Image: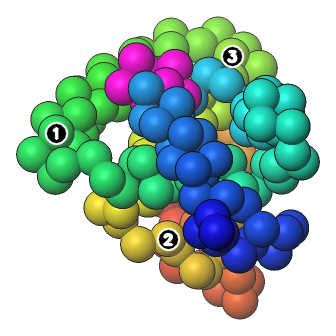
Amino acid sequence: MTDIVKRKGGPLKKEIKYAILESLNKLVQQGNAMSVNHQALADKYGAEHNINIKRQTISNLLDQVYKSIPPENVKNIELKIELLYDKMIREAQLLLQKASSQKEKKDAIDLMTRVLDKFIDFLIKAGRKAPVTQNINLQADITQKTLNVQIIDDRRQVIADDSNN
């Protein structure tokens, strides 16, 4: 009798799960996991094993792979990512300073926000940062001479206000 792992979408045999985990581990080690769509992976592995695999199953298995990375490797990776993050933020700040139009300023701020989101996502997936349960909304108004930034939490309370007048 084969061992079966019970899943919401139906039973997934252990040997299939381990084969998928091994393949996902190789993807992560090669650095290709971030560039692949989870649904595409679900379709690929489903076709290989002649079963229906949901996107969420792939996401959960990838989370397992990320959490199995040894802490010392994650620390090295985190350091490299932090250095890249700092460099990208500095570049975005330079773009913001050199911006001559409102659109260029908005694009620079959007770039900084996306970089920060990706960095936080990595830390959460690596299990090094707890997910934030509170929804925080960052709002910025740009005029020709001022940049006003407000951070508003999900209760609509202003928790930070940086107004440059």
- Badge 3 element: helix
Which residue is identified by label 3? 104
Please name whichever residue, 50 or 70, is drawn nearer the observer in this view of the structure.
50
Instruction: Count residues near mark 2 (Cα–Cα under 10 Å), then give few for <14, some for 14-19, many for 20+.
Output: few
Give x and y (percent) for residue 145. Answer: 61, 33
In magenta, the rendered stretch is: 27-33
Q: Nearer the viewer, residue 3 or 69?
A: 3
Query: Residue 57 at x, y = what percent?
Result: 71, 56
- Residue at 60%, 80% (x, y): give it: 134
Residue 69 image position (x, y, % from top left): 27, 47
Horizontally, residue 135 falls left or right of residue 8, namely: left
Q: Quick check: is 145 in the magenta stretch?
A: no
Q: Residue at x 72, y 61 (%)?
A: 12
Residue sitting farthest toward the bottom: 155
| Residue at point 68%, 16% (across, down) | 104
Amino acid identity at mark 2: Pro
What is the distance, in whole Å, between disc 1 and disc 3 at their CAs? 37 Å
Circle 1 residue: 73
- The numbered mark, 1 or 2, whose residue comes first in the sequence reads 1
Q: Is residue 135 above or below residue 64?
A: below
The residue under label 2 is 131
Residue 90 lies left or right of residue 98; in this view the side is left
Q: CA distance from mark 2 to mark 3?
A: 31 Å
Give residue 102's quadrant in the image. Answer: top right
Please tell me whether residue 7 is drawn above or below residue 71 in the rendered image. Answer: below
Name the residue at 41% across, 72% down: 130
Can residue 113 be seen here? The reply is: no
**How many other residues sit within 10 Å of disc 1, few (<14), some (14-19) or many (≥20)?**
few
User: Alpha carbon of mark 1 to alpha carbon of mark 2: how far?
Assistant: 21 Å
- Magenta stretch containing residue 28, yes or no? yes
